Amino acid sequence: MAALGIVRSEPDLSDSVHPFRERLAETVSWCQRRAEQGDLKDALRTAELAPPPASSWHETVRAVAEARVQRLGRSWRRSLEPLGGGQLVLYFPTPPHSRGRARSASAGYFDDRDIPPWDTWIAYIEEPARSYLVCWVPPQATEAVTEALKLSRALRWFEGSGVGLEDQLRD
């Protein structure tokens, strides 16, 4: 993992990016069903997946992912497109947040601290100089998310971001 610049990750990507791709497929399958239900700010914050309080980002992302895959069961289907028509967005928890401007611009897709809905969380990555959450954005939210990204230094599209995981996923 050192070649990627990744120090630690959830899921563990030290041997392969396969766990990330599997988690992405689960996330897309779960969220596609909910994104069609209407209001994304509520549809993608399933109460049963709510992050546990006062946990590290790694533990929190693992708990959300485990709850999601448990509720998906064995009958979920993989999208024909790895991104299911959506995109990946990065959330950097340490920079200054937009103080609710990203929330307003995205009609509540992001919360007041610019955090994407927890149903969309895929991975948490630590690199030597930064840490970030990787999330899936359904196609229905792309326009609103694009507007919100203009207002927040804590958010960035994955593609072209230059994070360590980006190069590995291209291979």
Image (cartoon, rainbow, N blue to C red):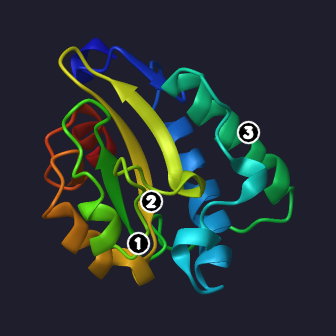
The kind of secondary structure element at disc 2 is strand
- Separation (CA) of disc 2 from disc 3: 16 Å
Residue at the image position 43 percent from the left and 67 percent from the top: 109
In this view, 146 is above or below 67: below
Residue nearest the viewer, comparing 83 with 151: 151
Quick one: quadrant of the N terminus?
A: top left
Q: Are marks 1 and 2 in contact (CB under 8 Å)?
A: yes
Residue 68 in view (yes/no): no
Q: Which mark is residue 66?
A: 3
Q: Nearer the viewer, residue 20 or 124?
A: 124
Between the C-alphas of marks 3 and 1, the distance is: 22 Å
Q: Are marks 2 and 3 in contact (CB under 8 Å)?
A: no
Q: Is residue 88 left or right of residue 124?
A: left
Tag 3 secondary structure: helix
**Residue sitting at 39 percent across and 45 percent down?**
134
Judging by the rendered image, the residue that carries numbered circle 1 is: 86
- Viewer-closest of 156 and 46: 46
Q: CA distance from mark 1 to mark 2?
A: 7 Å
Amino acid at the residue labelled 2: Trp
Relative height, residue 161 to residue 1 (above, below)? below
User: Badge 3, how many Cα within 10 Å: few under 14, some, many 20+?
Assistant: some
Q: Which sits earlier in the primary sequence, circle 2 or circle 3?
A: 3
Q: Position of residue 59 (x, y in %)?
A: 60, 24
Q: Please name the residue that numbered disc 2 is placed on.
A: 136
Answer yes or no: is residue 108 visible.
yes
